[in-house]
Image (cartoon, helix red, strand yellow):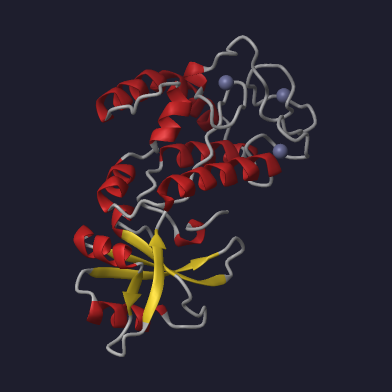
Amino acid sequence: MPNKTPTCYSIVVLNVPPQWDVYQLENDFKMQHSTVVKVERLFINGGKPISKVRVDFSDSREVTGILKQKKILLDENSTAYPVELYIPPMRVLRCYNCQKYNDHIAANCPDLDNPVCFKCGQSHPFSPKCTNQICCAHCQGPHMSGSPQCPVKAAERKKCNDETKKKNNNNTNVRAQQQFGTNPWTNHSNNVLYGQSQATTTNSFIEKLHDAMPTIIVQQKELDAKKENKFSTLAQEFDEYFMPHCTPDSMMSLQR
Ligand SMILES: [Zn+2]
Ligand SMILES: [Zn+2]
Ligand SMILES: [Zn+2]
């Protein structure tokens, strides 16, 4: 179920035993903190609950206070738990022309004349009719480029997460986090996408998205035309690409 609370008002509470009931926890937190909206258990890859919960607030001031104290009160007996800033999971972007990760989108591909097939990893343009053996362009494994099974993709995701974590490590300023939260891509992602060192404003961001749309629409049409399950990975990537990270699924709340 999508969570409509902006992630800018979210924190992660640590050392919360996995067997504890989150509904009870939510009630307890609400008793102590009037702007708590929701408490959600976090899971690791594979669905195992861990000793962390995400707590969403409707008011940034309460979050700021809690982050400054580095702990949150659970009950009147002064039981406090350590907290950290909630960092939304990073999306790994992939150029649909050359298959490169986290560098640019197909509309800005520097290798337009040198396309790589996402099915077989060989040098030919995108074609659903490709009958070559499936081979990942990144790791030469038996999956298509961009597959969740790809270890290169997993490493890219970890790199993104680590960079974001480092950036936010000493930052308990919720206003900064709000800016982070309102932009569907981090400044870093804008930089790697568009090769700019300055932060991209929302307007120019929309312009660039607009410029990229014809290519994206063509790609999407090609996908729609071929309703083969084989291409669901690409479609999923497309969704990931545009899904704002303020509606994360708690299953993905930590590194995948
Ligand atoms: Zn490219
Ligand atoms: Zn091919
Ligand atoms: Zn691979």
- Say which of 65 and 86 sits in front: 65
**Residue occupying the point 44% across, 57% down:** 249
Q: Is residue 101 visible?
A: yes
- Say which of 138 and 122 sits in front: 138
Relative to 49, is 150 on the left or the right? Answer: right
Relative to 122, is 2 on the left or the right? Answer: left
Q: Residue furthest right?
A: 133
Where is residue 98 drawn, in percent x and y? 62, 21
- Say which of 88 and 229 sits in front: 88
**Residue occupying the point 76% across, 33% down:** 135
Where is residue 231 drawn, in percent x and y? 61, 36
**Residue occupying the point 37% across, 18% down:** 211
Relative to 10, is 14 on the left or the right? Answer: right
- Point out the image quarter for the N terminus: bottom left
Q: Residue furthest top?
A: 113
Q: Is residue 50 above or below residue 225?
A: below
Image-quadrant location for residue 197: top left
Where is residue 236 drawn, in percent x and y? 53, 42
